[in-house]
Image: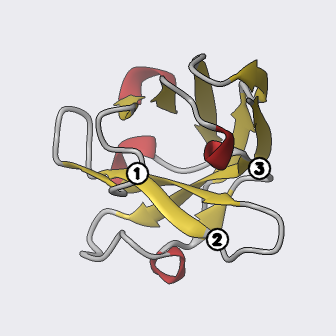
């Protein structure tokens, strides 16, 4: 099992940047693929980005491509989401999630076994 704790959320004006962190504990971090999801009020949780392993393949939702970057540091058991050029429509609770590396799928919330508690990101216009 792995425990995930997000941090780094906050309020920012449109065009600004934030970096979210997700610290993992419990199991071997490098044995998991990691993802970021978000959920806005009244909407379903949606995929944002995923990373298979450090330096490996990354995937992004079309809405964040070119603005967000997922990365991970296995030595620190941490995955990051650098968010630049933020827009009001990026406002949501952001969650990190983990799935064992042997599983192939990682683009939907149902693919993931472990979730953090979420961190709020608010972007004002």
Q: Looking at the image, which residue is at 78% across and 41% down? A: 119
Residue 22 in the image, given as x and y percentages of width and height = 61, 36
- What's the CA distance linking mark 1 and mark 2? 13 Å
Judge by depth and name the residue closer to the eye, 83 or 57: 83
Judge by depth and name the residue closer to the eye, 81 or 121: 121
39 left or right of 110 in image: right
For mark 2, what is the residue? 45
Outermost front residue: 125
Judge by depth and name the residue closer to the eye, 65 or 97: 65
Q: Describe the element under mark 1 as helix, strand or loop.
A: strand
Give the quadrant of the N terminus.
bottom right
For mark 1, what is the residue? 49
- What's the CA distance linking mark 3 and mark 1? 15 Å
Q: Looking at the image, which residue is at 29% across and 75% down? A: 103
Q: Describe the element under mark 3 as helix, strand or loop.
A: loop
81 left or right of 8 in image: left
What scheme was used to colour the molecule?
secondary structure
Give the mark nearer the N terminus: 3 vs 1.
Answer: 1
For mark 3, what is the residue? 118
Q: Describe the element under mark 2 as helix, strand or loop.
A: loop
Marks 3/1 in contact by CB < 8 Å: the verdict is: no
37 lies above or below 74: below
Residue 40 in the image, given as x and y percentages of width and height = 74, 61
Give the quadrant of the C terminus.
top right
Residue 61 in the image, given as x and y percentages of width and height = 37, 57
Judge by depth and name the residue closer to the eye, 72 or 8: 8
Give the mark nearer the N terminus: 2 vs 3.
Answer: 2
98 left or right of 124 in image: left
- What's the CA distance linking mark 2 and mark 3? 11 Å
112 lies above or below 69: below
């Amino acid at each position: 099992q792995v425990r995930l704790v997000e941090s780094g959320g906050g309020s920012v004006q449109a065009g600004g940047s934030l970096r979210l962190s997700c610290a993992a504990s419990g199991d071997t971090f490098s044995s998991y693929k990691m993802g970021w999801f978000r959920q806005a009020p009244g909407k379903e949780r949606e995929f944002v980005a995923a990373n298979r392993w450090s330096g490996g393949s990354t995937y992004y939702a079309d809405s964040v491509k070119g603005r967000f970057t997922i990365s991970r540091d296995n030595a620190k058991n941490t995955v990051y989401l650098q968010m630049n050029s933020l827009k009001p429509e990026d406002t949501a609770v952001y969650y990190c999630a983990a799935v064992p590396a042997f599983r192939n799928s990682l683009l939907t919330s149902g693919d993931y076994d472990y979730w953090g508690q979420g961190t709020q990101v608010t972007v004002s216009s």
